[in-house]
Image (cartoon, grey):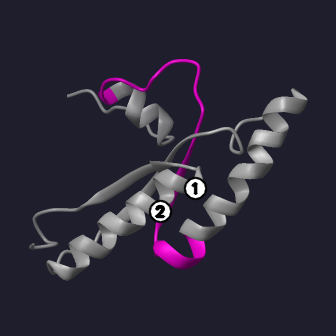
Protein backbone atom coordinates (compact mmCIF):
# COMPACT_ATOMS: atom_id res chain seq x y z
CA UNK A 1 0.00 0.00 0.00
CA UNK A 2 3.02 2.29 0.27
CA UNK A 3 3.29 4.24 -3.01
CA UNK A 4 6.94 5.02 -2.18
CA UNK A 5 7.75 1.31 -2.51
CA UNK A 6 5.23 0.03 -5.03
CA UNK A 7 3.60 1.40 -8.17
CA UNK A 8 0.56 -0.34 -9.55
CA UNK A 9 0.05 -0.28 -13.33
CA UNK A 10 -3.28 -1.36 -14.76
CA UNK A 11 -2.83 -2.87 -18.21
CA UNK A 12 -5.71 -3.20 -20.66
CA UNK A 13 -6.51 -3.12 -24.34
CA UNK A 14 -8.72 -0.44 -25.88
CA UNK A 15 -11.93 -2.49 -25.91
CA UNK A 16 -15.06 -1.97 -23.83
CA UNK A 17 -15.00 -5.08 -21.64
CA UNK A 18 -11.28 -5.00 -20.76
CA UNK A 19 -11.46 -1.28 -19.90
CA UNK A 20 -14.53 -1.85 -17.70
CA UNK A 21 -12.79 -4.77 -15.97
CA UNK A 22 -9.68 -2.66 -15.32
CA UNK A 23 -11.87 0.15 -13.97
CA UNK A 24 -13.57 -2.34 -11.65
CA UNK A 25 -10.16 -3.57 -10.45
CA UNK A 26 -9.13 0.03 -9.85
CA UNK A 27 -12.24 0.58 -7.72
CA UNK A 28 -11.42 -2.55 -5.69
CA UNK A 29 -7.84 -1.37 -5.18
CA UNK A 30 -9.02 2.06 -4.10
CA UNK A 31 -11.36 0.49 -1.54
CA UNK A 32 -8.27 -1.27 -0.16
CA UNK A 33 -6.42 2.05 0.03
CA UNK A 34 -4.25 1.39 -3.02
CA UNK A 35 -4.12 4.01 -5.76
CA UNK A 36 -2.95 2.77 -9.17
CA UNK A 37 -0.02 4.84 -10.44
CA UNK A 38 -0.93 4.62 -14.14
CA UNK A 39 -2.78 2.74 -16.84
CA UNK A 40 -1.21 1.12 -19.90
CA UNK A 41 -3.38 0.69 -22.98
CA UNK A 42 -1.61 -2.09 -24.83
CA UNK A 43 -1.67 -3.28 -28.45
CA UNK A 44 -3.40 -0.16 -29.76
CA UNK A 45 -4.18 -0.08 -33.46
CA UNK A 46 -5.10 3.60 -33.05
CA UNK A 47 -1.47 4.30 -32.14
CA UNK A 48 -0.24 2.48 -35.26
CA UNK A 49 -0.19 3.96 -38.75
CA UNK A 50 -2.26 1.83 -41.11
CA UNK A 51 -3.79 2.04 -44.55
CA UNK A 52 -6.07 -0.96 -44.13
CA UNK A 53 -9.76 0.07 -44.05
CA UNK A 54 -10.52 -2.72 -41.58
CA UNK A 55 -7.73 -1.66 -39.20
CA UNK A 56 -8.69 2.00 -39.57
CA UNK A 57 -12.20 1.11 -38.41
CA UNK A 58 -10.79 -0.84 -35.48
CA UNK A 59 -8.56 2.14 -34.62
CA UNK A 60 -11.57 4.46 -34.76
CA UNK A 61 -13.47 2.14 -32.40
CA UNK A 62 -10.57 2.18 -29.93
CA UNK A 63 -10.65 5.95 -29.57
CA UNK A 64 -13.78 5.88 -27.39
CA UNK A 65 -12.05 3.59 -24.89
CA UNK A 66 -8.80 5.56 -24.95
CA UNK A 67 -10.84 8.69 -24.23
CA UNK A 68 -12.60 6.94 -21.33
CA UNK A 69 -9.28 5.98 -19.77
CA UNK A 70 -7.86 9.47 -20.29
CA UNK A 71 -10.84 11.38 -18.93
CA UNK A 72 -12.55 9.09 -16.41
CA UNK A 73 -10.17 6.47 -15.12
CA UNK A 74 -6.55 7.57 -15.14
CA UNK A 75 -4.56 10.63 -14.21
CA UNK A 76 -1.65 9.15 -16.17
CA UNK A 77 -1.63 6.59 -18.94
CA UNK A 78 0.51 5.25 -21.77
CA UNK A 79 -0.75 4.19 -25.17
CA UNK A 80 1.37 1.35 -26.57
CA UNK A 81 1.00 0.62 -30.29
CA UNK A 82 0.38 -2.80 -31.72
CA UNK A 83 3.90 -4.04 -32.46
CA UNK A 84 5.23 -6.63 -34.87
CA UNK A 85 7.45 -8.11 -32.13
CA UNK A 86 6.76 -8.12 -28.41
CA UNK A 87 9.05 -5.85 -26.36
CA UNK A 88 10.66 -8.60 -24.32
CA UNK A 89 13.70 -7.72 -22.25
CA UNK A 90 15.17 -4.54 -20.87
CA UNK A 91 16.57 -3.24 -24.17
CA UNK A 92 13.27 -3.62 -26.05
CA UNK A 93 11.31 -1.98 -23.21
CA UNK A 94 13.70 0.95 -23.11
CA UNK A 95 13.49 1.22 -26.91
CA UNK A 96 9.71 1.32 -26.62
CA UNK A 97 10.04 4.10 -24.04
CA UNK A 98 12.37 6.02 -26.36
CA UNK A 99 15.43 5.53 -24.22
CA UNK A 100 18.74 3.77 -24.63
CA UNK A 101 20.33 1.28 -22.29
CA UNK A 102 23.41 2.65 -20.52
CA UNK A 103 26.21 0.09 -20.44
CA UNK A 104 28.34 -0.09 -17.31
For image coordinates 60% across by 69% down, the residue present is 68
Q: Where in the figure is residue 62, as x and y percent of width and height?
A: 69, 51
The residue nearer to you, when weighing 7 against 13, is 13
Q: Which residues are magenta?
A: 70-90
Characterize the local packing of mark 2: few (<14), some (14-19) or many (20 or more) Cα atoms within 10 angstroms: some
Q: Where in the figure is residue 83, as x and y percent of width and height?
A: 58, 26
For image coordinates 49% across by 36% down, the residue present is 96
Q: Secondary structure at mark 2?
A: helix
For image coordinates 58% across by 19% down, the residue present is 84
Is 61 included in the stretch rendered in magenta? no
- The image quadrant that residue 66 belongs to is bottom right
18 relative position to 89: left or right: right
Q: Where in the figure is residue 9, as x and y percent of width and height?
A: 32, 57
Relative to 47, residue 102 above or below: above
56 relative position to 29: left or right: right
Is 87 included in the stretch rendered in magenta? yes
- The image quadrant that residue 94 belongs to is top left
- The image quadrant that residue 45 belongs to is top right
Q: Secondary structure at mark 1?
A: helix
From this viewpoint, is residue 33 visible?
yes
Q: Are marks 1 and 2 in contact (CB under 8 Å)?
A: yes
Q: Where in the figure is residue 48, as x and y percent of width and height?
A: 71, 36
Residue at the far front: name it: 17
Residue linked to disc 1: 16
Give the label on residue 48, or none. Answer: none
Total number of numbered discs in the rendering: 2
Residue linked to disc 2: 20
Cα separation, mark 1 vs mark 2, equals 6 Å
82 relative position to 18: left or right: right
Amino acid sequence: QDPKQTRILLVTVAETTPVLEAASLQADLRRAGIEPWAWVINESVAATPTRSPLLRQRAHNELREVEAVATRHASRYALVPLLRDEPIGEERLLELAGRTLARV
